[in-house]
Image (tube, coloured by chain):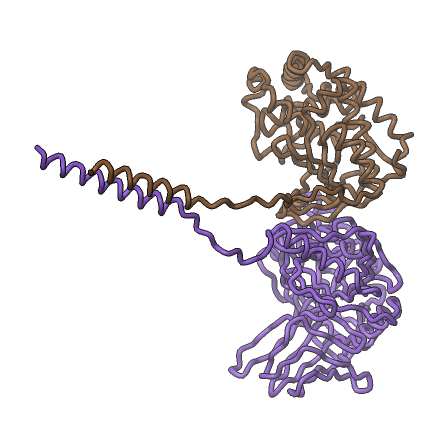
Amino acid sequence: MMNDMKILNIRIINLLFISVILSVLGSCTPEVDSVFDDSSANRITKALQVDKEILQGAKNGWLMKYYPASDQRYGGYNMLVKFGTDGNAVIACDKFDASKTSTSNYSLVQSAGPVLTFNEYNEIIHYFSDPVNSDGIGKKGDGMLGDFEFTLREVSNQKIVMYGKKTNSRIEMTPISPDTNWTNYLKSIQVAEYNMGFGMYSYVAGNITAKVTMSYRSMTMNYADEKGNNISTNIPYLVTPTGYELYDTLSIGNVKVKTLTYNAGNHEFVSDGTGGAKLYGIITPLNQLLTGGSNWYFSYGNLSTFGQPYWDKAANDLYTKEGEVLSYMYLNANIIYFKSGSYPGKYTMTSSLQGDNNIGFKLSGYDSNGQFYYTNGYFQYFLYPFCGASGRSFTLSCDNIQNPTVIILTDVTDSSNVITLTKKSSAPY
Amino acid sequence: MIMKYIKFILIVAATLVIGSCSNEKLDPNSIFPTESPERNAFDTWLLNNYTTPYNIAFNYLYKDNDTDQSYNVIPAEKDKSIALAIMIKHVWLEAYAECCGENFIKTYSPRVMQLIGSGAYNSNESMVMGTAEGGLKVMLYNVNAIDINNPYIDVENPYVDKTNPTKDLNYYFFHTMHHEFGHILNQKKNYSTDFNLVSAAKYKSTDWINLNDADAPKLGFVSGYASSEAREDFVEIYSIYITHSEACWQKILSDAVNGTDTSGRDAIIAKFNIIKNYFKTSWNIDITQLRDVILKRFEDIKTLDLKNLK
């Protein structure tokens, strides 16, 4: 009996020991030294204040190398931005008249890090974000897909690196020197862009030669690599007063290139670094240019009175019978691409080139949508001024032989049939 | 002996437990700033006309976390935001205040109005008119389309051409706001389920998009969208009725008659009577009187100064 009591007591003691140990352990607060000396809220507030002072510190503003769209398909734009202490930013851009500025509110806010936002409508920067671009670039709902909110990554007085919040495009800003006149600077870029524009280019790096066309501010390079594979790559760039600056470092033929500097005397662009790569501006015969791989847009207003009645009939039938409207039609490398309602299709042409300025087109095939719209009597008429039933021949002329933005086709057999094709995208109606 | 031992252990344990509690002081400073933000004249006006009286945040600047990131949109222009703020106050907030009392609109109005400059487009290029999230926030799109020199409010045409939207403020903003507000009121107090039975067999769900507004009355609906489901039907009748003239309402009713078949008109009238009764008994609102107040206030907009804040 006594023994039993003892055993019981020892058990109680054991239990007490265990509970003491547990409660002592449990009551320990694991004290860990903070990695940061202040709360996250206070740190971001301070960081935003510092960033704001740096932004406002550039008295003549910042040169922002702005790339809309996550794939930078439209290339880069020189945006000049001055951040005022009144909360307003003054913005100019080489896409607009050089002397034009637009002023609107900006803010630095906390949103997964410091974010610079242009949160009040600004005619210049929001041109690139408007879901319905005023020049008809991009589809409705997209526009040019540009950001107006930027996550700041590196901020110093010499350079700011930020990323578009939606696109993640890298956008850099450098302070503009105090003696630079904004208007003159933008003008020098616009003049350079015009002078450096060619209908076609060729790029030579190492033992590779690429054929280059440009759309917006993006080069498309087509070449065969060392193994003989055909490569097509897009190179977004920004125009500077002296040449082109590429978004990413270009590496073709083991030569790395970031900038190309123009020499007006020989139409050549010299690359930076030691690889000796060069871009050559080529003055191309018009008939080669027309079939060379840029888009050349058709529109009703650019047809002579010869062609317009055919388009009237086709558009009218298309609308009444199918409830559709032609939304684009362009020629690219002997193929006419179109979209009717929501249906894209194409027609293949055979072209015959004579001399520099003469060309003949004849319809040689279509895809299934193309077949539908042709055999149902719509594109028979849309195509009639261009290739008739059995082909047509044209004499070509243009606005600027170095870099045509329009090519005028005059029918050899009937000079009243004139078609003007534009390089700038344009809706058919 | 054993008991003493136990007592000793208990004392040691208590000491250890108490001693191991550490006493960490809280930071006396709030992480939320308590200073007033810098306010421009418009901000101050909004404080005095929206925030203080109605507890509404009128966000004319773009705020990413109040915006649907799946759409590509742009911020609103300031002068147009000012005009819209003046108009919404006059034809919306004060119309309800006049008709239903200050407390009614203070209690039930959405708390956030977020302005967006452009439209919001779906991938099929159709446009979102406005949305209300849980009665809390109303999104107002297309603010930059407002013509502040010639504010245009169409109360006569029940069928707006959506393929070529006009600058009609009624279609873009006021009808939309009453529509969304109708949802808020329905969420607070339910309407009679008899309403759901009137056109029960005719709702089209997502296929409403294929019903033109002009063809809707014959099926017993005041708009194409009203044919989607009963709760949309309810707020469409409500919002179209109170933002359009009696002549316009009669036009809808007469368009609802198809030869000798009056079933469309009968359905609209049956539903309208339930709605009128719901607002009278649940909210003590005479919707015909509310309509008269709204239409009179629409008239005022022609002479309202939309450029200067008072």
Left or right of residue A93: residue B130: left
Q: Position of residue B298 (x, y in %)?
A: 83, 26
Picture colour for chain A:
purple
Left or right of residue A125: residue B135: left
Depth check: A52 or A201 in front? A52
Q: On the image, which quarter does residue A23 sit in?
A: top left
Depth check: B112 or A15 in front? A15
Q: Position of residue B179 (x, y in %)?
A: 68, 28
Q: Determine whether A70 is above or below A131 in the image.
A: below
Q: Position of residue B78 (x, y in %)?
A: 82, 44
The number of callouts visible is 0
Left or right of residue B137: residue A303: right
Depth check: A269 or B265 in front? A269
Which residue is at a point 75% across and 18% down the rendered structure image? B101
Q: On the image, which quarter does residue A100 sit in?
A: bottom right
Which residue is at a point 83% across and 36% down the rendered structure image? B45
Q: Determine whether A357 is above or below B73 in the image.
A: below
Picture colour for chain B:
brown
Q: For the view shown, which residue lies furthest in the left direction? A: A1
Q: Is residue B39 visible?
A: yes
Which residue is at a point 26% across and 40% down the rendered structure image? A16
Q: On the image, which quarter does residue B7 sit in?
A: top left
Q: Determine whether B25 is above or below A258 in the image.
A: above
Quarter of the image with the N terminus of chain A is top left
Q: Position of residue A49 (x, y in %)?
A: 72, 56
Depth check: A135 or A43 in front? A43
Q: Is residue B261 visible?
A: no
Which residue is at a point 83% across and 52% down the rendered structure image? A86
